[in-house]
Image (tube, rainbow, N blue to C red):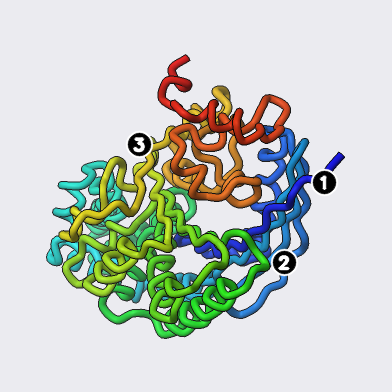
């Protein structure tokens, strides 16, 4: 039997606003990879990570019934930047969060959210509404104690203590601290940039250009999830300026933005640098860009074309795909997580329980290039048989020629 051709890819993944260190991200990746194996009847092994200042890298070898793939997975680090923001004392984070709230309103971003996705607008208000409720409860408790003790000092002390206790509980159970830090970082990124990230993205962009000059891989895939999609655009724009789009031959270059926060930043009047980068990316023929959105994820902009909403001329890029998270998960598991906003948002970078049009691990570890998967309405579903075998080209073409009809059968 002829040995199956090995599909080789190099991935640059930029996650969302998550302070998890690379070892934790690697552990999640390996755990979720087991789901991919079960769903697609494949086997996969992942090496231990090599952790550097800019990248954490590990190798993945995946094999199916008649296919093989090799992936060099490069996690672009910014956990240290996130940790620095979260390490600031509360007396700095709370005013910073409130400043960010008013900045995003006065700079027009919130009103843009209302036009693009009222659900995202509610997500924007969520941490600040929680803060308001905590403040009112603390005020009520402090006033009540002040009246009962006839001491304003006791009332003030009690109010502060109640607020601190409630804030600690909200950080643990409602992600309040993480959400405030997210908006604080977003404002800083727009207004001032981040020196650590600027230097790091420039070095990684050089790495991408060098990888594109060789023939060691068939595909270079950049993935940006959530706020990481904004940093991915920044990264790709730097690589384009360094000559990425001018490469002759070489591997395919693809960009996937999943559960993207591009509009979160792009609708802010001060985000002219990001809008210019998006405009450049959308006109580069050598770059394929697909944007994946889901209705059940309140932390992304469902059915929104980012370019017109940011006042940019519409092009053929990105290819916008709406997917169902419900279709990705086991019917018994979906109800347990559907009300957890953060968990639903993270499904874009988790393993599926069922074959679905969007599958993060099929993009990262499967034998099909990202553009082919994205251009098919049903993704890779019709390219494999029930035993996980890649169909021959003729059968694959026939199965996916009319994916809309196939999905209705």
Residue receiving disc 2? 49
Task: Judge whether 191 appears above or below 319 on screen.
Answer: below
Task: Indicate the quadrant where residue 389 lies.
Answer: top right
Question: How many marks do you count on the picture?
Answer: 3
Q: Are marks 1 and 2 in contact (CB under 8 Å)?
A: no
**Left/right of residue 342 with respect to residue 108 in the rendered view:** right
User: Percent from the top left, x then y, of residue 94?
Assistant: 32, 68
Which residue is at the front of the view, 200 or 388? 388
- Work out whether 29 lies above or below 83: above
Q: Earlier in the sequence, mark 1 or mark 2?
A: 1
Could one spot residue 401 in this view of the protein? yes
Q: CA distance from mark 3 to mark 1?
A: 42 Å
Residue 11: x percent and y percent? 58, 62
* Element under disc 3: loop
Quick one: label 3 or label 2, which is nearer the N terminus? 2
Residue at image mark 3:
295
Q: In the image, is 232 to the left or to the right of 276?
A: right
Which numbered disc, 3 or 1, marks the residue closer to the eye?
1
Question: Residue 297's image quarter?
Answer: top left
Task: Say which of 373 and 396 sits in front.
Answer: 396
Q: Secondary structure at mark 1?
A: loop
Q: Which of pointers 3 and 1 lies earlier in the amino acid sequence?
A: 1
Q: Position of residue 65 (x, y in %)?
A: 77, 36
Furthest-top residue in this view: 409
Give the residue drawn at x 43%, y 66%: 232
Residue under numbered circle 1? 3
What residue is rendered at 25% in x and 67% in y? Answer: 275
How far across and how far down the image is residue 74, in percent? Answer: 61, 66
Question: Crowding near pointer 3: few (<14 within 10 Å), some, many (20+)?
Answer: some
Judge left or right: residue 278 versus residue 296. left
């Amino acid at each position: 039997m002829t040995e199956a051709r090995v599909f080789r890819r190099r991935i640059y993944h930029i996650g969302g606003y998550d302070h998890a260190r690379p070892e934790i991200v690697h552990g999640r990746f390996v755990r979720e990879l087991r789901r991919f194996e079960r769903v697609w009847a494949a086997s996969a092994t992942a090496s231990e990570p090599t952790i550097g200042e800019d990248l954490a890298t590990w190798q993945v070898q995946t094999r199916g019934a008649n296919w093989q793939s090799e992936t060099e997975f490069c996690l672009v680090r910014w956990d240290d930047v996130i940790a620095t923001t979260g390490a600031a004392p509360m007396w700095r984070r709370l005013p910073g969060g409130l400043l960010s709230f008013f900045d995003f309103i006065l700079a027009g971003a919130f009103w843009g959210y209302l036009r693009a996705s009222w659900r995202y607008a509610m997500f924007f208000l969520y941490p600040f509404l929680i803060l308001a409720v905590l403040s009112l409860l603390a005020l009520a408790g402090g006033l009540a104690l002040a009246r009962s003790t006839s001491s304003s000092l006791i009332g003030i002390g009690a109010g502060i203590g109640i607020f601190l206790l409630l804030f600690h509980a909200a950080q643990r159970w409602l992600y309040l601290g993480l959400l405030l830090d997210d908006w604080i970082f977003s404002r800083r990124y727009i207004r001032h940039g981040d020196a650590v990230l600027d230097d790091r993205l420039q070095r990684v962009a050089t790495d991408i250009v060098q990888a594109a000059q060789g023939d060691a891989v068939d595909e270079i895939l950049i993935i940006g999830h959530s706020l990481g999609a904004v940093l991915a655009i920044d990264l790709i724009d730097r690589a384009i300026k360094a000559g990425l789009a001018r490469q002759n031959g070489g591997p395919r270059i693809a960009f996937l933005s999943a559960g993207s926060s591009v509009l979160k930043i792009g609708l802010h009047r001060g985000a002219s640098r990001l809008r210019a980068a998006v405009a450049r990316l959308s006109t580069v023929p050598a770059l394929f860009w697909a944007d994946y959105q889901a209705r059940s994820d309140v932390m992304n902009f469902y059915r929104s074309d980012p370019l017109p909403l940011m006042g940019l001329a519409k092009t053929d890029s990105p290819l916008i795909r709406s997917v169902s998270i419900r279709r990705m998960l086991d019917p018994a598991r979906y109800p347990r997580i559907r009300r957890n906003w953060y968990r639903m948002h993270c499904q874009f970078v988790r393993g599926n329980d069922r074959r679905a049009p969007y599958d993060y691990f099929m993009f990262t570890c499967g034998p099909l290039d990202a553009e082919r998967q994205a251009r098919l309405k049903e993704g890779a579903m019709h390219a494999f048989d029930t035993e996980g075998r890649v169909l021959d080209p003729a059968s694959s073409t026939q199965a996916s020629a009319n994916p809309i009809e196939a999905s209705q059968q």
